Image: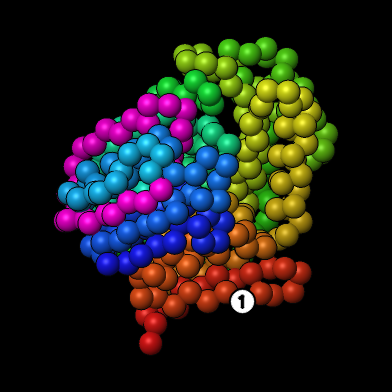
Amino acid sequence: MLTIDGSAGEGGGQILRTALALSTVTGKPFRIEKVRSGRPKPGLLRQHLTAVKAAATISNATVDGAELGAGAITFTPGSVSPGEFAFAVGTAGSATLVLQTVLPALLIAPSPSKLILEGGTHNPMAPPFDFLVKSFLPLLNRMGPTVTAELERPGFYPAGGGRFNVTIIPPARLLPLEMLERGAIRTIHARAVVANLWRSIAVREVNLVGRLLSLSDDALIVDEIHGALGPGNAVTVEIETEHHTEVFTGFGEVNVRAEGVATKVAQEARAYIASGVPIGRYLADQLLIPMALAGAGRFRTGPLSRHTTTNLEVIRQFLDVEIDLVEQPKRIWTVAVTGTRN
């Protein structure tokens, strides 16, 4: 049985999610200790407990120690059973991170699956739904599967209550992905959404992003969302290039001015544009597991986050693959899965 140190690297929930995902894929049991010890509130929170239960459900696993606040669990998977599942976080915790946990095993399952996920869909520190649909899933689908997602209701922190549906049709095999060039930038759009808040907040945000990125008025979009359970605000910059679309998102917070949210998102977008790479820092982290499962592939990205390097170390504990990191001039990295380790 593998023993995973939950305090390693960035010491967050990604270590647990990656271990769960790859345990269900490989059938290798593991015990993780010091769960999320690098966070202000260590141990299992609701979204992490939901991820554990979801992984256990699809893989018919036996789990010891899975309860709120737990600092260690033991996970022994059985065989993966694709099908129709519903997983609810029960708080504003990220439902997209629950998807991240179960998706790898369902990508290589023998038949399709359908998921209903409830919880947060637009959360700080988690991939928002727009990022999944416009940036991650299109690249994943180039690897052979057909994965679609449909948003029924957004869920913002702290109310949550979001809901989305996912359909997963596995391929005969996962194909390598190569993303070394992004090509010319075709369009840039800025979109600000508000739910149960003043429309003027979104207007201020897109106007500032437009000025900072030199966008025309027709590239600025304001949306008022109806049906959300609580207030929420998000600002998204979508950069469509010849070969790929990157999405950058910021979230409104109490005591943070709209201009502060907009400025941060615009700065991230400008850094990506200046870098010349096709893959942004958040997407780099998301692509690691499917590329490792495919056994081959390459992409270029900017400086590697601690989140990404920590994720790599967990992957190496479960999968016998060679993952090379090569730094090029100007802090540009090529990440390459080159086959099985000797």
Vertical placement of residue 272 versus 341, above or below: above
The residue at 40%/62% (across/down) is: 4
Count of numbered tags? 1
Quadrant hosting residue 45: top left
Q: Is residue 313 left or right of residue 321?
A: right
Report which quarter residue 196 is drawn in.
top right
For the question of whether residue 175 can be seen, the reply is no
SS type, badge 1 = strand
User: Mark 1 — residue?
Assistant: 326
Q: Position of residue 213 (x, y in %)?
A: 79, 40
Location of the C terminus by quadrant is bottom left
Residue placed at 68% from the left, 33% from the top? 190
Within-10-Å neighbours for mark 1: few <14, some 14–19, many 20+:
few
Which of the 4 quarters of the picture holds residue 256? top right
Q: Is residue 106 visible?
A: yes
From the top left corner, tell me how far across and down residue 290 is, in percent. Answer: 40, 60
Of 160 and 6, which appears nearest the observer? Answer: 6
Report the quarter where the N terminus lies.
bottom left
Q: Read off the magenta span.
A: 71-99
* Residue 231 left/right relative to 291: right
Q: Is residue 222 magenta?
A: no
- Expressed as whole percent of the image width and height from the top left, the position of residue 174 reads 33, 63
Residue 36 lies left or right of residue 302; in this view the side is left
